[in-house]
Amino acid sequence: MEDVKPVRSGWYNAFRPWSLHGAVIPVLIGGAVAYHDGHMNWWIFLMVLVCGCLLQSAANLLNTYGDFVRGTDTVENRTMSPELVTGKLRPKYVLLVGLACLGITALCGIVFIWYIGWGILIFGLLGIAGAGLYTVGIAYKYHAMGLVSVFFMMGILMPLGTYYVMSGMISYEVLLMSLPNAFLITAVLSGNETRDYYEDKGSGVRTLSGFLSYEGSLNLYLMLNGIAFPILLALVVLQTVPWACGIAFIALIDMYILVRNGRGTAGDERKSRLLVPLAFRMNWHFGLLLTAGYLIGWYLITGAV
């Protein structure tokens, strides 16, 4: 991946399907542990996966809408989100589709309540609030809460909620296994904030990265990506997860590429634009390998049934 192709304005770019790692990987983690613990219901699992993708899509659409109406996205900085500033899409339609994604998720929540009980409502309400209020309403993105919200809402609560909807319980194994992935998901948004560092400063957008220097923001991005590996090592050494989860260390190849690119972003627009897609790629690889390693460790190596 030597460069990112210019985006094509339209619904596909507004939905940003390549960002669905933020929903798919947490659901896979929670689902893998539920499967091992004997709580798997495939229909419920698929519904949770769809709802996670709907929440991520809603967040993407409402972020596009919110940044436009607040004047953050302009014709001058339209590279990543050109749909509204160029008139390709109408703001009210983007808003309505984003709200529809939240509405469908809420309807699915009724099924989850019927299946497992009212306890799942807490996860559902937090998920809908996290996706819906990012740049709309209280717009917590503009109050430097984006990174914190992504870490807890997507990195921690989504896998815990996946396990809960199938078991009615909280799993500490899911919690611990979610930690490295939670940092990687957060790193993607950190890369976004670093890429847009000077534009956000000029627009008065208050992100957490904006309280740091550019070098500090870049170091935060690298740290959030890199910390996943020592956490995984600790989980394997302490036998919290099967040792086969160590196959996720293959993603160190992605980490090497990511660090090499990150160290050269100052004054290099091409490398700066690669911050986010490289983090996307590493999160996909790490998360899929982690989940596969968990299942391989239990069912192919130890012969668990």
Image (tube, rainbow, N blue to C red):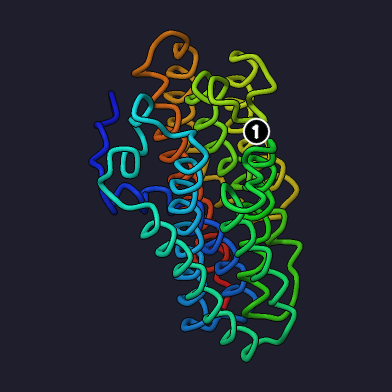
Residue 115 x/y as whole percent: 62, 89
Q: Residue at x 38, y 18 (%)?
A: 271
- Point out the residue furthest to the top here: 267
Q: Nearer the viewer, residue 48 or 296?
A: 48
Q: State the residue position of label 1.
A: 227
Looking at the image, can residue 304 be seen? yes
Q: Nearer the viewer, residue 73 or 35?
A: 73
Q: Is residue 199 left or right of residue 235?
A: left
Quarter containing the N terminus: top left
Q: Quadrant of residue 174?
A: bottom right
- Where 143 sits versus 196, above or below? below
Label 1: state its secondary structure. loop
Q: Is residue 206 left or right of residue 103?
A: right
Residue 97 x/y as whole percent: 40, 64
- Where 70 sits versus 45, above or below? above
Looking at the image, can residue 242 be seen? no
Quarter containing the C terminus: bottom right
Q: Residue at x 66, y 45 (%)?
A: 140
Kind of residue at badge 1: Ile
Q: Please tell me how crowded label 1 is: few (under 14), some (14-19), or many (20+) other residues with Cα within 10 Å.
A: some
Residue 94 x/y as whole percent: 38, 56
Q: Is residue 55 left or right of residue 274?
A: right
